[in-house]
Amino acid sequence: MKPSRALADVLAERVVLLDGGLSNQLQAQGCDLSDDLWSARLLADDPGQIEAAHTAYARAGAEVLITASYQATFEGFARRGITRRDTEALLAHSVTLARRAAEAVPHEVWVAASVGPYGAMLADGSEYRGRYGLSVAELTRFHRPRIETLAAAGPDVLALETIPDTEEAEALLRAAEGCGIPLWLTYTATAAHTRAGQPLAEAFALPAAAPAVIAAGVNCVAPADAAPAVSIATAVTGRPGVTYPNSGEHWTPAHGWQGEKTFTPTRLTDWTAAGARLIGGCCRVGPPDIADLARLLKDV
């Protein structure tokens, strides 16, 4: 169902449930993501799978669906021979697919257009390190065309997500200026520092100064690090907190995901106590986890 109110207004009243990891759900549906474009490849090759994944999360109770545009860039698609005009159409279609899934369920669902970091385009794990050797101006020029294209497609909010350092956060916020769409910004971080090692207390000063930011926090973090990081986000920005941790397993380009899952919906109390109002999951967190969160949220 298309929402009747702005997401920011609802966040002022209650916790809103995000979806989980798109890639793991696509893999569960049998999709091969062993590709530099990752889930974004399916925007061109099999968009029905993306809509099905979104629908699985909406049916699990998710109230916000994040589009499949995290790794969708003009540069990445150009390497596959896809023209700029066709890339614009694919980015816009990512919003359409999420909106279709939202309309398939009886509860209100907002669509968040994902804007991933520069490192996602490189497909070498550098989004978990940052410090690419590019200036803020260069990163701004990289991000602006994609943000403008996604904003024109009419999402409810932009998700500037998995940001590893303050330089890229500054660039993204500059690129989003004047786009007319509210946004949230989430760092990938430890409990107190960005992946590049900058104190989160300093990092969150950037979204705090941006009027379009309706929420700020962290994603693709260890579940145990989420509450301390969100506490810093809410204290510095004065905005609702966002957290969508990964499963707690560890990922490397060479070996993929390793370790044990530590994501558990029972952490919900800690996250809400820290000020989180947008809560969900990232990599390796699936529809059953979101359904568990939805059940617990009925008692919050």
Image (cartoon, rainbow, N blue to C red):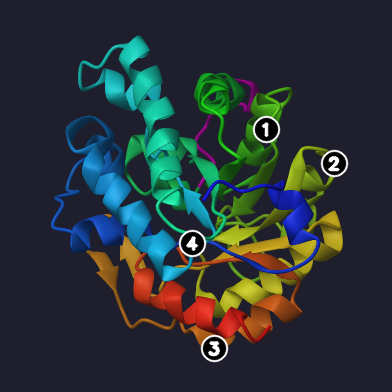
What amino acid type should be assigned to the residue bearing mark 2? Ala
- Residue topped by disc 2: 209
What amino acid type should be assigned to the residue bearing mark 4? Cys
- Does dot 1 land on a helix, a strand or a loop? loop
In this rendering, position of residue 55 left or right of residue 174: left
* Mark drawn on residue 266: 3
Marks 4/1: CA–CA distance: 23 Å
In this rendering, position of residue 210 left or right of residue 3: right
What amino acid type should be assigned to the residue bearing mark 3? Thr
Residue at image coords 71%, 27%: 180
* Mark drawn on residue 90: none
- Does dot 3 land on a helix, a strand or a loop? helix
Residue at image coords 36%, 12%: 84
- Does dot 4 land on a helix, a strand or a loop? loop
Q: Of callouts 4 and 1, which one flags the residue occurring earlier in the amino acid sequence?
A: 1
- Residue topped by disc 4: 220
291 versus 210 height, above or below: below
- Does dot 2 land on a helix, a strand or a loop? loop
Q: Of callouts 2 and 3, which one flags the residue occurring earlier in the amino acid sequence?
A: 2
Q: Of callouts 3 and 4, which one flags the residue occurring earlier in the amino acid sequence?
A: 4
Q: Residue furthest front?
A: 106
What amino acid type should be assigned to the residue bearing mark 1? Ile
- Residue topped by disc 1: 181
